[in-house]
Image (cartoon, coloured by chain):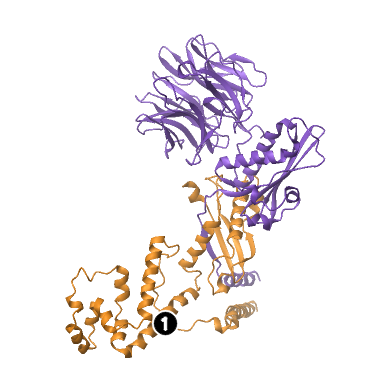
Amino acid sequence: MSRSLFFSFFLHAFFICLTALTLPFMLRNPIDLPPIVSVEFIEIRDETNIPYAPKARKIIEKVKKEKERVVSEQAPPADIAKEKPDRISMPEDKKEKQELKKKKQNPEEIKPQIRQVSEFEKKELFDPNQIAALIDKAKEEQAETQRKNEKLTQSNVKNSFAKGLSLSEEDALRAQIFGCWSVPLGLPFDEELLVRIKLKLKPDGTILKSEILDHARMNTPGQSFYRVLAESALRAIRICQPLKVPPTGYERWKNLQLNFDPTEMLKG
Amino acid sequence: MKKIFFIFLFFVISFKNAYSLIKVDITRGNLDPLPIAISPLHVDSKSEKLSLFDTDKLGEEISKVIEQNFRSTGLFNPLKKDSFVQKPDIAHLKPRFEDWRLIKAQALITGKVLIKNKKLKVEFRLWDTIASKEMIALSFTTTPPNWRRVAHIISDKVYERLTGESGYFDTRIIYVSETGPKDRRIKKLGLMDQDGYNVKYLTLGNELVLTPRFNPANQLITYMSYFKNMPRVYLLDIETGIQEVVGSFPGMTFAPRFSPDGKKIIMSFAKDGNSDIYTMDLKTRIVEKITNHPSIDTSPSYSPDGKFICFNSDRSGIQQIYVMRSDGTQVKRITFGTGLYGTPVWSPRGDLIAFTKVRKGRFYIGVMRTDGTGERLLTENFYQEAPSWSPNGRVLVFYRETKSGTKGEGFSAKLWSIDITGYNERQIKTETDASDPSWSSLLSK
């Protein structure tokens, strides 16, 4: 009797949990689902690009402009060919290659010191698909499609919060709070200084509810420093709001826990 | 049945963990001074008029003292009063937080002053403008001439509430006041508030005085004075003005300092060219020899728990800092850097030792851990020495001499303070030249 009851309960519990786990996905607005595209996992990286160093930012912006220029302008093939030795390595069109060789500014004749370009330029300009598209108009469409796919890839990574925030998004949030958090300097070095704050956020990043998880410690005798620290952390969150959260994937980050720990900073 | 319950519990927990909470670690913040608004304290219209000061301006004067205290810390940025939107009387009752947030104030001090029956009553409130709530509210009653002290106590309470460590504003500094040319200096004992106000001179300047130090109760001062060209250690009661010689020794006594319980004085005592460290019980007057080494041991200072003593000695051939147990055992050298180390002083928090270092003719004030590691030189100059800790162990006061010409012109000695981070170096204004400062503990504990 007890065994059958056990199996019955086990199966019921299993199906209840299965339903509870799967139903929220079914109820989701299908518009939120990203279009299915094949993606290379190139965006998963250990380094962040936030915040940029001022010099690096300038360089990156310059490169981006350069990239836009190449895409938007329908530059004549001859001009592009001037600076791109790889163009001649394309085996598709031998006729084009022969014509170019006759021109004065044949890339093969350009001296190496003139051909020097920055690292960014090298990467951006060395795109066989683009060059091929310029040579063969039939391939232009294909190159544009790939470009669109690349854009989709980046936004998709932002949307994919299966395992939380991406490193860049996490760092953006951190960088924002760093600026808002005035760390109290009188804190003892040898005490546990971790303050955990659970937040419930609105889709725009403003705070709906904040809760200090170790609230009891606030009023513990001899732990007055903890109250000072917790209050400073709460102030930081309130000053910072709306928090820099991703524009999509609200369901994933609507509940967020921030762990404030100034130990390393105070020890210097 | 229990099994079923546990299995059910397991499923519930598993279900809960299916949506893992995103956690972000914040390990850095900014160290910018905290913007704080100090509203002038509202003076109650029922207040009596006094000839001592302009009663109507008392609230403003108190707020100025508080503002000056906070500015001197380097940790706070008191905002300009011109930017305040709300008037003091209303702000004290119910601040309009959005107005204070508008000027970027994160904390707000409001208050009220009432003089009735020749008593001064001051109440204040500290507000968190971001959370829109009151953080602390206190009231003090005292005699009207004590108004500056009330301002210092308010500063201490606010400082403690916002930083988590005790303040150091309601304190005094004892120092040697110096006047006259360098070769004929008149030195007197001076006593003042930590901000340089309420100066009193405790000696007349007939005798040379050196190294004054407070006892833990801030009632007694021990110092060294020359009597018939012989240095002696004295005790002086600040309130009564009674002065006495601490023991009668055939040799010279130097650098006296109280033990943390105030029951003993520790000092160095020179005899036949050898200087050792001694303690004297103030009640029984029993003298105990702590070090016994054929070298010069001077400048002893107790750890706050009274278990250890740091001092400087040339027993290794060059003046360095040593630490030993208070009974003189387990002597251990803690400094090994280049240059001379002297005047070690144990921090009231017990974690650091402040010292003076001399290297290549330059003088440095620095701090290090009690085992000698983590040496940090905070400030460098032509001549500076004698660091003394603020009661919370965050700030050091010391004196610095400027270069003098061949005729002794241009010479001056001034008191300076510096944060243990090495920032916020400031001169403490004194009426005369000043040296050998010693910071008292908090007067109101």
Name the colour assigned to chain A in the rendering: orange
Seen in the picture, residue B282 relative to A107 is either above or below; the reply is above
- Residue B382 lies in quadrant: top left
Chain identifier matching the purple colour in the rendered picture? B
Disc 1 marks which residue? A148
Q: Which residue is at the front of the view, B284 or B350?
A: B350
Q: Is residue A82 above or below residue B67?
A: below
Quarter of the image with the C terminus of chain B is top right
Q: Hey, which quadrant is residue A64 in on the image?
A: bottom left
Above-or-below relation of A37 to B228: below
In the figure, is residue B189 to the left or right of B312? right
| Residue at the farthest bottom position | A138
| Amino acid on which the number 1 mark rests in the picture | Lys
Q: Residues within 10 Å of mark 1 (few under 14, many from 20)?
A: few
- Which of the 4 image quadrants contains residue A188? top right
* Residue B273 drawn at (x, y percent): 40, 14
Q: Position of residue B342 (x, y in %)?
A: 43, 27
In front here: B137 or A218? B137
- The chain to which mark 1 is attached is A
Quarter of the image that includes the N terminus of chain B: bottom right
Secondary element under disc 1, as helix, strand or loop, is helix
Residue B99 position in % (x across, y down) = 67, 56
User: Image point 22% across, 82% down: which residue?
Assistant: A88
Place of residue A154 in the rendered image (x, y in percent of width and height, measured from the top left): 44, 76
Q: Using residue A136 as the reference point, say whether residue B221 is left or right of it.
A: right
Q: Which residue is located at x 61 percent, y 57 percent?
A: A234
